């Protein structure tokens, strides 16, 4: 585990400024050198030096980004390993591309939550007192990663990945049964069969990668849920934020019906807005489905914009929602301040600090600056996580898909070169494992299960 | 009642394939050893198929031979057919499979056991384990004999509360109508063991003279047989063929018509059966669209007319079994000599074991074979040899031996069992190994002979010859690396092999890396002066040809070995580890893994848990270090 090299964007995602990609581990220097076009050879360079150059695509040679690269040789670095930091100009797309090619390097993988800190600790760079903090960091981040992973597991991508894996595992099981049951009357594995089966998987991977490239959906941003009873002005708020801020608007298929997503930057802070479908108990099945998803969105949000109608007294539903906000990062948006006040402000002020209460009238487009201020305040006080996991997990998916693609191509090539099936199987297996990593599926016994469900074996 | 019957270092209960290996290993390592069996005529008996080896299983036999076990030598003496399987595939999955003369096999093994110094073979049924302060101290037999011992290895096979089931018929029995062991389970439970109920089965046996072989296909053995043991040089054994036939439409009809009488479906069977070895009724129900199934007819020995009907394991009533047999081409007039049956038995939940095969529940008590939830003679023998070695080493105050997953299938199997447990009888498959290319049939001796030598089960002489082989292989690889081949030398061979021409001089090694070029071809251009055997040449060829893939796997092993070497202290309290998920706390407390590597394979333990554990251990070590 300590032996591989890890990389991640170590600055908060946002616009402007400089973004830093940090790389740590035995292959940090050589791996970066392979991508770095410069007058200096990083491998030869002294520790604690900065170098100007370009990150280029290792295959095409295309220049991706103009960068400054800082080199720190272990043990004189944060993690006590060889560390390289790539300073890019920050544009989210460019940084993402740089990370992309970095992750394509041999033995390079995306850092797990808290992993740089963990390595620093395990390598003796951090004292004993900080051990607990490290544990908290790993736990809290991975819990979040889990909920994101689960959300995606429920989603469209996961369904397609599962189908893709099924194609690969059927091929694997077929190879395995040829090996473990050589006298059994199952079809002999041939190069043609391997190529055809792999091609089905490859086509699907190509399709998935194409959507990833074409869409250029910027999935980063603070996950922000707009919550409130029906007709308090949630959608209007969303629309106002989207229009006023020249948002990058996207439709995420399969989710738009119930949860509308918008990407906006508010005062340079990236937000990913979710308009929930109106939270209340309902007996209508279709609506209930939407409500369920809203609850999920609510549970996963980094920031909640809770909208209340100034013109109505607190409803039982409101109180229930308020109770559920405990311990969360909430901005209370009191909407419709252009109308007479009937809201129980005293009760609200008891529950929320003044900074978290924003009065506005979406209809009159008033009060937006207060909202901006409230959110910025929270953000710069470090109360809000920049949601980098959501962003990064996307990069991660692309990297893993590419890895699976390469493994399958290697497998076909090996098979065509006359490499025996038990040897080329290593390639197919790693394709399957890469795909599994996307949906967080453990390798476990599922291959054995597949063999026995796909083939009739026995003595 | 009861009398003092003797004092031993190691007692092995059960003389099947696990027990025989355990007892031989312990005695050969210098321990006073008692091997106790319910019936002396059943030593190393094969109650099911009369064969040994095949993919993964054959690998285990080669491995246990390298560790100084007996199964390889014994089958080499008593085989009646030898076949190398998977020869069309890569070297890692070449697998030797032998048909045994099952009677010769058991007599030969019994003889070896009887002639081994320090080893006492005795008939007797162990009924009660004697445990004092959590430590095993001895046992009591049905006849009241009290045997005292520092360690006990339990290899009870399918005898523990064994129950035979066939159609509506059900009775307490061990395999092949042997006396079952009815009381030992209670003793195990009393000492805190969790038991499970497993099931297995066997097909009917038929009389050779009533088979019409003209309706079947012959399956002969290899003309030039290879051997399991690294010690066996040659053999004059007579070989008999096996025969292949298929089930018919009529077979499937008979089974479907009688499903209501099948205990598998009527609910009479409560034990979990092996997935890899389903009964014929199970196969026909689960794979209804498969029109026919293979049936192999295998001789059970040179001096018997019994044939084993492989593929027809069944617990149908006897009359239905006869009908099924006679519906198969070639068996229309067959006489059934023994019926098939299903057998249920108690097994120990294997996560109650350390990777040494000592139980966590009772100190000094080891278990091996089917009692650990496995199935198969080879799996049993592989565990037996490890349990025997570790029981002996415990008595001698030495560190236990644990085979790593990267060192052998035996290691893969034991790690799977003690780390993950098993829901059905466990069979080894090559796909269970993540480093298949390293765990080859051909290099079992290279992997494990040094361990066998170190623990004293491999003789000086054999070790010398092993070192010689290893050195010669390395020298030859080096020679090929440094020997240049000119285009004009290589061209005829390349042309014959339809391989691309070389424009300039290259080293021999890179030529051999081409899939279509063999070592034999190179030999014709640049013969070696070293005294290389065929086996050594094969080694050279494999190590060069698959070097790329082999190196990749070695790299993975090296990376993970850091985790494997990171020991977890015995006294760690997982409930105290702040930040561990509650599932991980529970699972880790149950399994008590010895290393971070093992911990990472425990089901329900996530990479984040492992990170937290690493941080905790670092913390722990620093605190311990600070205390001095």
Image: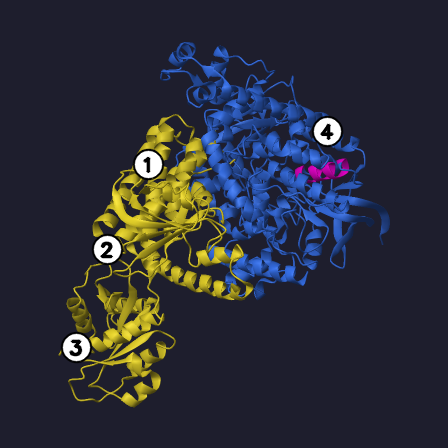
Image marks 3 and 2: residues in contact by CB distance under 8 Å: no
Label 4 chain ID: B
Helix, strand or loop: magenta stretch: helix
The disc placed on residue B546 is: none
Instruction: Please state the horizontal and vertical placement of residue B376, each as a whole percent of the image.
Output: 59, 38
In the image, is residue A368 part of the stretch drawn in magenta?
no
Label 3 chain ID: A
Image marks 1 and 4: residues in contact by CB distance under 8 Å: no
Secondary structure of the residue carrying tag 1 is helix
Secondary structure of the residue carrying tag 4 is loop
Q: Nearer the viewer, residue B462 or B199?
A: B462
Q: Earlier in the sequence, mark 1 or mark 3?
A: 1
* Chain letter, yellow in picture: A
- The residues bearing labels 1 and 4 have C-alpha atoms spaced at a distance of 50 Å
Instruction: Please state the horizontal and vertical placement of residue B591, each as a whole percent of the image.
Output: 59, 55
Q: Where does label 4 land, which residue? A: B459
- The residues bearing labels 3 and 2 have C-alpha atoms spaced at a distance of 28 Å
Colour convention of the picture: by chain
* Chain letter, blue in picture: B
Question: At 65% across and 18% down in the image, what residue appears?
Answer: B235
- The residues bearing labels 1 and 3 have C-alpha atoms spaced at a distance of 56 Å
Tell us which disc is closer to us: 1 or 3.
3
Instruction: Kindly tell me whether residue B248 is visible in this rendering.
Output: no
The disc placed on residue A217 is: 2
Secondary structure of the residue carrying tag 3 is loop
Q: Where does label 3 land, which residue? A: A362
Tell us which disc is closer to us: 3 or 4.
3
Q: Where does label 1 land, which residue? A: A197
Q: Nearer the viewer, residue B286 or A327?
A: A327
Q: Earlier in the sequence, mark 1 or mark 2?
A: 1
Q: Earlier in the sequence, mark 3 or mark 2?
A: 2
Magenta part of the chain = B17-28
């Amino acid at each position: 585990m300590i032996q591989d090299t890890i990389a991640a964007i170590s600055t908060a995602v946002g616009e402007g400024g400089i973004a830093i990609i940090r790389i740590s581990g035995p292959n940090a220097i050589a791996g970066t050198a392979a991508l770095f076009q410069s007058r200096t050879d990083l491998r030869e360079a002294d520790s604690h030096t900065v170098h100007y150059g370009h990150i280029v695509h290792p295959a095409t040679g295309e220049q991706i980004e103009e960068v400054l690269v800082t080199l720190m040789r272990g043990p004189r670095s944060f993690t006590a390993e060889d560390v390289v930091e790539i300073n890019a100009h920050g544009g989210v797309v460019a940084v993402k591309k740089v990370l992309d090619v970095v992750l394509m390097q041999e033995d390079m993988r995306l850092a797990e939550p808290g992993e740089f800190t963990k390595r620093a600790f395990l390598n003796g760079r951090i004292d004993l007192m900080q051990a607990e903090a490290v544990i908290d960091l790993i736990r809290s981040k991975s819990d979040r990663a889990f909920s994101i992973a689960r959300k995606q597991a429920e989603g469209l991508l996961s369904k397609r990945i599962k189908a893709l894996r099924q194609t690969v595992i059927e091929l694997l099981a077929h190879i395995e049964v040829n090996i473990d049951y050589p006298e059994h009357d199952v079809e002999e594995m041939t190069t043609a069969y391997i190529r055809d089966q792999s091609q089905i998987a490859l086509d699907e991977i190509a399709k998935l990668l194409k959507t990833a490239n074409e869409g250029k959906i910027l999935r980063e941003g603070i996950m922000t849920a707009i919550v409130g009873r029906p007709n308090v002005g949630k959608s209007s708020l969303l629309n106002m934020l989207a229009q006023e801020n020249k948002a990058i608007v996207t439709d995420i298929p399969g989710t738009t019906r119930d949860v509308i997503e918008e990407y906006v930057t508010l005062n340079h802070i990236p937000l990913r807005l979710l308009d929930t479908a109106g939270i209340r108990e309902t007996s209508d099945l279709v609506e209930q489905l939407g409500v369920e998803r809203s609850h999920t969105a609510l549970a996963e949000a980094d920031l909640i914009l809770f909208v209340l109608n100034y013109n109505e007294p607190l409803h039982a539903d409101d109180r229930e929602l308020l109770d559920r906000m405990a311990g969360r990062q909430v901005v209370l948006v009191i909407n419709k301040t252009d109308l007479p006040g009937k809201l129980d402000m005293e009760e609200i002020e008891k529950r929320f600090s003044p900074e978290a209460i924003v009065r506005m009238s979406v209809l009159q487009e008033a009060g937006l600056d207060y909202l901006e201020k409230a959110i910025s305040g929270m953000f710069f006080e470090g109360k809000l996580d920049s949601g980098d996991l959501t962003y990064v997990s996307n990069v991660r998916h692309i990297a893993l898909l590419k890895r699976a693609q390469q493994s399958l191509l290697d497998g076909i090539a090996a098979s065509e070169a006359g490499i025996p099936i038990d040897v080329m199987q290593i390639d197919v297996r790693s394709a399957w494992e890469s795909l599994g990593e996307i949906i967080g599926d453990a390798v476990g016994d599922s291959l054995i299960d597949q063999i026995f469900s796909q083939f009739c074996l026995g003595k | 009642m009861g009398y003092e019957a003797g004092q031993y270092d190691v007692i092995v209960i059960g003389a099947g394939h696990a027990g025989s290996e355990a007892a031989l290993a312990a005695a050969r390592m210098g321990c006073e050893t008692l091997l106790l069996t319910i019936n002396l005529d059943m030593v190393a008996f094969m109650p099911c198929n009369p064969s040994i080896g095949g993919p993964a299983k054959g690998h285990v036999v080669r491995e246990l031979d390298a560790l100084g076990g007996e199964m390889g030598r014994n089958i080499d003496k008593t085989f009646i057919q030898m076949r190398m399987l998977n020869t069309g595939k890569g070297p890692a999955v070449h697998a030797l499979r032998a048909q045994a003369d099952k009677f010769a096999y058991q007599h030969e093994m019994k003889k070896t056991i009887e002639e081994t110094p320090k080893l006492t073979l005795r008939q007797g049924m162990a009924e009660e384990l004697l445990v004092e302060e959590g430590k095993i101290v001895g046992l009591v037999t049905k006849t009241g004999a009290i045997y005292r011992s520092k360690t006990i290895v339990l290899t009870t096979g399918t005898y523990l509360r064994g129950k035979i089931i066939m159609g509506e018929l059900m009775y307490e029995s061990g395999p092949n109508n042997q006396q079952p062991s009815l009381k030992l389970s209670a003793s195990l439970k009393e000492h805190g063991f969790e038991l499970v109920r497993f099931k297995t089965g066997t097909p009917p046996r038929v009389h050779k003279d009533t088979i019409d072989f003209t309706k079947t296909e012959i399956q002969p053995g290899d003309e030039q047989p290879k051997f399991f043991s690294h010690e066996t040089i040659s053999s004059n054994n007579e070989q008999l063929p096996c025969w292949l036939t298929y089930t018919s439409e009529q077979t499937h009809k008979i089974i479907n018509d009688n499903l209501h009488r099948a205990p598998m479906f009527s609910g009479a069977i409560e034990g979990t059966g092996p997935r890899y070895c389903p009964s014929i009724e199970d196969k026909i129900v689960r794979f209804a669209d498969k029109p026919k199934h293979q049936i192999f007819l295998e001789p059970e020995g040179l001096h018997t007319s019994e044939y084993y009907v492989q593929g027809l394991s069944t617990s149908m009533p006897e009359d239905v079994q006869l009908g099924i047999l006679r519906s198969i081409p070639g068996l229309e007039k067959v006489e059934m000599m023994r019926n098939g049956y299903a057998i249920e038995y108690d097994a120990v939940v294997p996560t109650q074991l350390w990777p040494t095969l000592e139980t966590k529940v009772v100190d000094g008590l080891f278990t091996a074979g089917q009692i650990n939830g496995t199935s198969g003679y080879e799996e049993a023998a592989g565990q037996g040899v490890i349990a025997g070695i570790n029981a002996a080493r415990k008595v001698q105050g030495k560190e236990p031996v644990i085979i790593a997953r990267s060192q052998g299938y035996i290691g893969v199997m034991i790690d799977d069992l003690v780390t993950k447990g098993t829901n059905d009888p466990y069979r080894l498959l090559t796909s269970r190994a993540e480093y298949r290319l390293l765990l080859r049939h051909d290099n079992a001796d290279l992997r494990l002979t040094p361990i066998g030598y170190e623990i004293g089960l491999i003789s000086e002489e054999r070790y010398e010859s092993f070192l010689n082989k290893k050195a010669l292989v390395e020298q030859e690889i080096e020679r090929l690396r440094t020997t240049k081949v000119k285009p004009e030398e290589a061209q005829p061979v390349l042309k014959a092999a339809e391989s691309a021409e070389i424009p300039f001089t290259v080293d021999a090694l890179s030529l051999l890396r081409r899939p279509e070029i063999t070592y034999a071809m190179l030999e014709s251009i640049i013969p070696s002066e070293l005294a290389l055997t065929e086996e050594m040449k094969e080694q050279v060829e494999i190590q060069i040809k698959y070097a790329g893939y082999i190196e990749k796997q070695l790299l993975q092993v090296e990376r993970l070995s850091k985790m494997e070497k990171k020991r977890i202290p015995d006294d760690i309290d997982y409930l105290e580890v702040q930040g561990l998920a509650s599932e991980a706390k529970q699972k880790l407390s149950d399994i008590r893994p010895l290393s971070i590597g093992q911990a990472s394979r425990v089901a329900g333990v996530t990479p984040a848990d492992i990170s937290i554990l690493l941080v905790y251990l670092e913390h722990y070590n620093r605190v311990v270090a600070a205390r001095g």
